[in-house]
Amino acid sequence: MKNVIALFTTILLILIFLSCNNKKVEKQKKEKEQSVIGVPYFKKLVNNEKERTRLWKAAIDSGDFRAYNKIAIAYLMSYRETDVYYYSLIMANKYHCPEAYYNMYIVLTHEASTGDMVLLSNDKDTKNLALYYLFRARELGFTDAKEIIELKYGRGKSSQNSSFFLKQLMNSPVSPPQFHH
């Protein structure tokens, strides 16, 4: 009987050891996968001229939303917001890409760095333009835009559409340029 209990205990300890070891291996595998998809992956993609050019060309020339999303996210994750704005504008105007509208909203409402300069515009016209992009992305079915609008304005309370913000922008008084000495 003691031998059976000892054998049973030994088997139980081995199973526990294998189970714990397997969880450790799974955790290491998961961490490795996340580092591949993390910022180093995006920087590598942005720095790969051949792949970067292929993706932008597929997006701009053919309206490939998948290619656009892949390279645009890489640019945003690599802190190249001002660069992605240009391509997003083309994708939005040419193909009505909801993610492009959303990315332009992100670029205009979040701080961006370009070399030695930090950019963030808080003027009324830029805010209206950013909201136009956000609401346009929602109208085109982009879920993230809908969620942000619901967070900002409450569920079902925002009946405005993108044209409301575009009209606000168009009706804004134009000030003559100011020259500083």
Image (cartoon, rainbow, N blue to C red):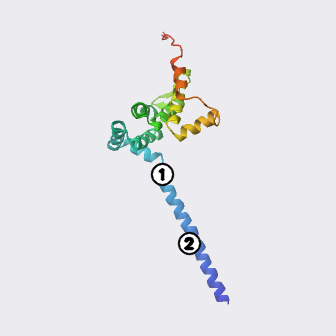
Q: As displayed, is residue 144 above or below residue 116?
A: below
Instruction: State the image coordinates of residue 135 (x, y, percent, origin top left).
Output: 54, 32
**What residue is at 64 percent from the left and 88 percent from the top?**
3
Instruction: State the image coordinates of residue 115 (x, y, percent, origin top left).
Output: 45, 30
Residue wearing tag 1 = 35
Residue wearing tag 2 = 18
Instruction: State the image coordinates of residue 73 (x, y, percent, origin top left).
Output: 45, 41
Which secondary structure, mark 2?
helix
Instruction: State the image coordinates of residue 176 (x, y, percent, origin top left).
Output: 49, 10
Number of numbered discs: 2
**What residue is at 64 percent from the left and 87 percent from the top?**
4
State yes or no: discs 1 and 2 in contact (Cβ < 8 Å): no
**Image quadrant containing the N terminus:** bottom right
Q: As displayed, is residue 168 above or below residue 177?
A: below
The answer to whether residue 21 of the structure is visible from this angle is yes
Q: Give the residue type at disc 1.
A: Ser
Residue at the far bottom in the pictured view: 1
Report crowding for label 1: few under 14, some 14 to 19, many 20 or more residues within 10 A (C-alpha). few
Disc assigned to residue 156: none
**What residue is at 60 percent from the left and 30 percent from the top?**
159
Comparing 1 with 52, the one in front is: 52
